[in-house]
Amino acid sequence: MKKIFLLTTTLIASALILISCGNKEPYIAVVSKGFQHKFWVTVRKGAEDAAKENGVKISFVGPETESDSKVQQDLLDSEINKNPDAIAFAAVTGDFSEQVRRIKEKNIPLIGFDSGILPDQAQGVVLATASTDNRAAAAVVAERMFEELKGRIAKFSANKKAKIAVLQLDNSDTGIGRAEGFVNRFKQLADSDTATANKYVLQVIVPTTQNESDIANEVNALRGKSVLGIYLSNEAMARGFLVVYKSAESGAANTIIGDAQDGGDLVVMGFDSGKPQLDAIRSGIILGSVTQNPYQIGYQAVSLAVKASKGESISSVDTGAKWYDKTNIDDPDIAQLLYE
C-alpha cells in the first residue's frame, strides 16, 4: 500500500511539473544595435506588438551606441545564459563568432534582423532574417543620383573626373550592403552610358564612429568644391552632414551645398529618416531619401522567432523600402514609415 501511495505521489508531482512547463510563457530575447537613433524606438514598438499578438515575453536590449561591440557581446552572452526559446539579433560591427557558437551548442533558434549577422560569422545558424534589402534600397538612391548628375558628369573627362562621395555607416552587413548597393548600381548606369563612362569616381568613406563629430569631420574634408554629390547611408550620416551645414558660416555653407565641384548645386541624398533629415528634405537641403519600415523589421523579427521556437518552417522577410522627397513626404503611405 505504501509503495502504491509513493508511486501515485510521484506521478502527481511529475504531472504538475509537466503542466508547469507547459504553461511557461515563451521567452524571446531581442538584442538590437542600440538606442542611438529613433529608428530603434519604432523597431521596438513593432517587436512588442508582435509579442503581444503571439502571447510571448520579450526582452529588447542593446548598447548605448552602435560602436559598442563589446557591450553588445556581453548583452548577447547574458541572454544566451537565460536559455530563451529563440533569439533575434541585429549585430553591430564586431566579432560574434563565439556567441553564435554558444547559440548553436545550446540549439537556440537564431533570427537575424536589420543588419543581421555577417555571413562569415553566422556559421549556418541563422534560420531567417527580417530586414530591408539594403542593396536594392541603396540602388534606388543610385538611380536617382545618376539621373540628377548624368548631364553634369558628361562634361568631365577621364583626366578630370566627377566625384561622388558615399558615407558608409559602418562595416556591418547593413553598412556594407548600403554602400555596395549604391556603388554597384551607379557604376552599372554610368558605365553603360558613353557620355559618362570613365568620367567619374566614387569615394567610399567610413567614419570612425557614428558620432556626429566624427561624421562632420569627414564631411568637412569634402568641402572646397571637391564633389558633385553625397550619399548619406543612414540617419547618423545625415545628422553629421547637417551639423556641418548648419554650423558653417554663410559662405562656407554655400560651399558645401550650393557650390559643388563644377560650380553647380551639390546633390545630397539619404537613407532612413529622423527629424533633421525630414526637415532638410522639406527645405531642399537633401534632395530625397529612401525609407525602411522599422516597425515591420521589429514585428517580423519577433514573429519569425516565435515560429522558429515552435519548429515551424520559416524564410527571410524583406520588410521593404520606398523613395521619398518633398513631393510625397506627407503622403499617407510614406508618412507612416517615417519617424522623427
Image (cartoon, rainbow, N blue to C red):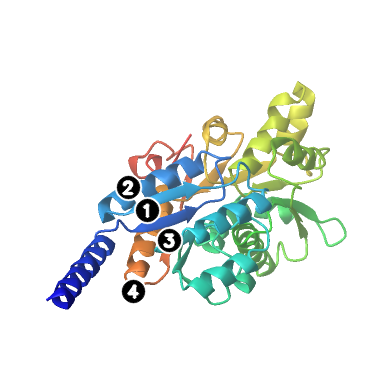
User: Label 4 vs label 1: CA separation?
Assistant: 19 Å
Write down the residue under mark 2.
Answer: 49
Classed neighbour count for the residue bearing mark 4: other residues with Cα under 10 Å, few (<14), some (14–19), many (≥20): few
Task: Please name the residue that numbered disc 1 is placed on.
Answer: 299
Q: Image check: 113 left or right of 217?
A: left
Q: Identify the element where label 4 is drawn.
A: loop
Q: CA distance from mark 1 to mark 3?
A: 18 Å
Tell me if label 1 and label 2 are in contact, CB under 8 Å. yes
Is 305 displayed left or right of 340 in the figure? Answer: left
Instruction: Inspect the image, locate mark 3, and give the three-letter code of the amino acid beneath it.
Output: Pro
Which dot, 3 or 4, sits closer to the camera? 3
Q: Amino acid at mark 1?
A: Tyr
Residue 113 shows up from this direction: no
Pointer 4: what residue?
311
For residue 249, the mark is none
Find residue 295 and report its horizontal and vertical position in percent. Answer: 40, 48
- Mark nearer the N terminus (4 vs 1): 1
Q: CA distance from mark 4 to mark 2?
A: 22 Å
Q: Residue at x 33, y 74 (%)?
A: 311
Asked if marks 1 and 3 touch (Cβ < 8 Å), the reply is no
For residue 84, the mark is 3
Q: Are marks 2 and 3 in contact (CB under 8 Å)?
A: no
Identify which residue, 278 or 42, lies in the foreground: 42
Residue at the left extreme of this rendering: 1
